[in-house]
Amino acid sequence: MATVVRKKPGQSDDKLIADFRKKVISDEILIELKQREFYRKPSVIKQEKIKERRKGKRRVGYSR
């Protein structure tokens, strides 16, 4: 998926770069890139998902 940011009339290059950075962060491209950097076995991915679910349940239980 390509990230496209178009330059508006009268917009400086610095502002264009800032808009691009915001777009990359909001699209979570860097997070996905880090996840794809190394191969993770499907069993490891499954374990991480289970761990995240348990972590979320723990947080909900102690809310006041």
Image (cartoon, rainbow, N blue to C red):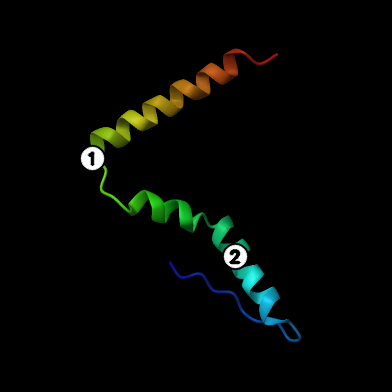
Give coordinates of residue 56: x percent, y percent. Answer: 52, 24
Across and down, in percent, residue 29 comes to 47, 58
**Percent x, y of residue 8:** 70, 82
Q: CA distance from mark 2 to mark 1?
A: 31 Å
Side of 24 where 11 appears, left or right: right
Residue lying at 51% horizontally and 69% vertically, measured from the top left = 3
The mark total stands at 2
Q: Residues within 10 Å of mark 2 (few under 14, many from 20)?
A: few
The dot on residue 41 is 1
Q: Amino acid at mark 1?
A: Lys
Q: Is residue 28 above or below residue 52?
A: below
Q: How would you rate the neighbour count of disc 1 (Cα within 10 Å): few for under 14, some for 14-19, many for 20 or more?
A: few
Residue drawn at x 25%, y 38% is 42
- Residue 31, placed above or below residue 53: below
Outermost residue on the right side: it is 10
**In which quadrant will I find the N terminus?**
bottom left
Res 18 → quadrant: bottom right
Q: Amino acid at mark 2?
A: Arg
For residue 44, side relative to residue 58 (left or right): left
Dot 2: element: helix
Which is nearer the N-term, disc 2 or disc 1? Answer: 2
Above/below status of 23 relative to 10: above
Residue named by callout 2 = 21
User: Where is residue 62 shown, x and y percent of the image?
Assistant: 62, 13
Question: Quadrant location of the C terminus?
Answer: top right
